Amino acid sequence: MNRISRLSQRLANQIAAGEVVERPASVVKELLENSLDAGASKLDIDIELGGLKLLRVKDDGVGIHKEDLVLALSRHTTSKIASLEDLENIESLGFRGEALASISSVSRLSMVSKSADDAADSAWKVEIQGQELQASLAPAAHARGTSVEVRDLFFNTPARKKFLKTEKTEFGRIDEIVKRMALSRFDVQFSLQHNQRVIHRLQPAKSHQEKQRRVGLVCGPAFIENSIFVDLEGPGLRLWGWVSLPTFSRSQADLQYFYVNGRIIRDKLVTHAVRQAYRDVLFHGRHPAYVLYLELAPSAVDVNVHPTKHEVRFRDSRLVHDFLFSSLHKALAEVTPTEQLAAHDADQAAGALNTPGAAYGSSSQLEDRQSNLSLAEPSTPAYVGGSRGFQPGARQIQNHLAAYAKLNADDAEVPPLGYAIAQLHGIYILAQNKDGMIMVDMHAAHERITYERMKQACRNEELKMQPLLVPLSIAVSRTEADCAESQQQALLAIGIELERVADESIIVRQIPSILREANIEQLVRDVLSDVLEFGSSDRIQAHQDELLSTMACHSSVRANRQLTIPEMNALLRDMEATERSGQCNHGRPTWVFQSLNELDKLFLRGQ
Ligand code: ADP
Ligand code: MG
């Protein structure tokens, strides 16, 4: 072992840079945060060669005092906090006073700034190289604000450089950072260029429409078309933003933006709560998409838990978890056909949807705007005769005509999902409402209706518990046993009666009777680990729902059963009245809609 010696300032900075400056995108993140903290309203980001050659961020913020320019580059220098009290009430994005020191220790950095105090025609420029040479200060020209230029990142730390990916990949990451930032501040103008090519130019967004437009530009038009806007309040909490309809799910968790007081975070607790809200409606293995903003008192959340500030700690994590879960769960349950159709109309009006077949549920699963209605490209003749076709009886024709007459009477109330006209191939119901055509997967729809009814029945009754013939003893950790003991009442409320019998052992006496076939030990372990981590557990309900879902699936109308028109209409009315009826129990869409406009386009009518 060598003797102990003090690290040089430069080496210390380079070590610290390891945490903050992982790749070009992390530099962009830090620079943008600084600009936003400086009150900028306009940000110009210039990138060359994926950021390896050059990264430049120009802002119109408050600027930096000439005397502070050099100081800003050293470690632990910040204008954002001065005391521990400030740290507990952070409202700025930065506060660690590390970014500029770290970045400049692994690059050639120059910074030009003009603060309000500088004379009208004078700005100052500071330059430094890997913090090897003394920083030099010289007069320069700049409008009020700051430009930071970072060249040759990692020129003096080749090991780091080796970990970088291709130009394209690194730029992709930068782009992602810029998008995240752009969604965090609608009031700020963003422009991003790569190798002199404009990638984004986002104007400040004030109205709801403009914000929605920016979300569409950043997340893609399909997301906005297939999401609902929520704005919910809880005790000291507000949650607003856009969440995808369950039928618009993704194979990866890549379209998930969550902001806490304007700061983007990736947090286990948040992800868990949102996932849980989608539990019952999402296709297996798929991920929801969302852009959500949580607002709460700065003192209720600790942001100083991670160097890149990607994680936060909520003072009352259980409250936050439950609020997120219950408000989103409710919002998703309340998506009725009327609302989905209204959203569809709005998109049409805004001209957002003009590809045929981009109706609800159809564009979603494919994640592009191709139609999965076979209508787009008829592969069979439009009229098929023979036994498989719809052959109406006299009464059915009468019903059909009556419904049709109602549809055409101006004053008549037409239900959102309209009236049934026919059954196709024993699988789909064809219906029409005032504005177009609706197709329903009758098995999927019926399954959801049965399932929701069974759930309702199950919850209205007290949870029936059943004593275990032989009480089950489980060895657990001390923490788990503590938790089991202190949460005994809460666990009883979800149907588990247990008792701590030793330091590291519990005994389960009763369980919900519907779960008697389940693996009790595993279930109790999972419940305890949930309660420890998130303050509550929905595993019992999840298990119960899974069982009900299977039962519903088996007891629902099978494909190829011939339904009468009144039966079909009854199913449509049930769908309108049922929560989550837009998706079957497995998250597939139960119905799709095409407006007359879209149909006209398919047939090139009026063009
Ligand atoms: P932190 O952001 O944590 O304070 P930094 O190293 O990122 O630490 O920045 C140090 C200081 O430099 C900031 O506190 C701020 O006063 C100043 N600064 C950095 N960038 C800008 C900018 N774009 N506009 C105005 N001031 C800036
Ligand atoms: Mg900073």
Image (cartoon, rainbow, N blue to C red):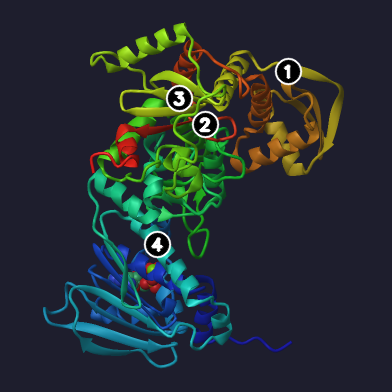
Q: Residue under label 1, please give it.
A: 465
Name the amino acid type tagged 4: Ser
Task: State ligand 1's quadrant.
Answer: bottom left
Q: Residue under label 4, please give it.
A: 83
Q: Residue under label 2, please give it.
A: 583
Q: CA distance from mark 4 to mark 2?
A: 52 Å
Which numbered marker is on residue 430? 3
For the N terminus, the image quarter is bottom right
Classify mark 3: residues with Cα within 10 Å, few (<14), some (14-19) or many (20+): many
* Furthest residue in direction bottom, as rendered: 133
Residue at 52% across, 23% down: 389
Name the amino acid type tagged 1: Met
Q: Earlier in the sequence, mark 1 or mark 3?
A: 3
Q: Earlier in the sequence, mark 4 or mark 1?
A: 4
Mark 4 and 1 residues: CB-CB less than 8 Å, in contact?
A: no
Q: Nearer the viewer, mark 3 or mark 4?
A: 3
Determine the secondary structure under disc 4: loop
Q: Is residue 44 visible?
A: yes
* Furthest residue in direction front, as rendered: 386
Quadrant in which residue 192 is drawn:
bottom left
Q: Is residue 77 visible?
A: no
Determine the secondary structure under disc 1: strand
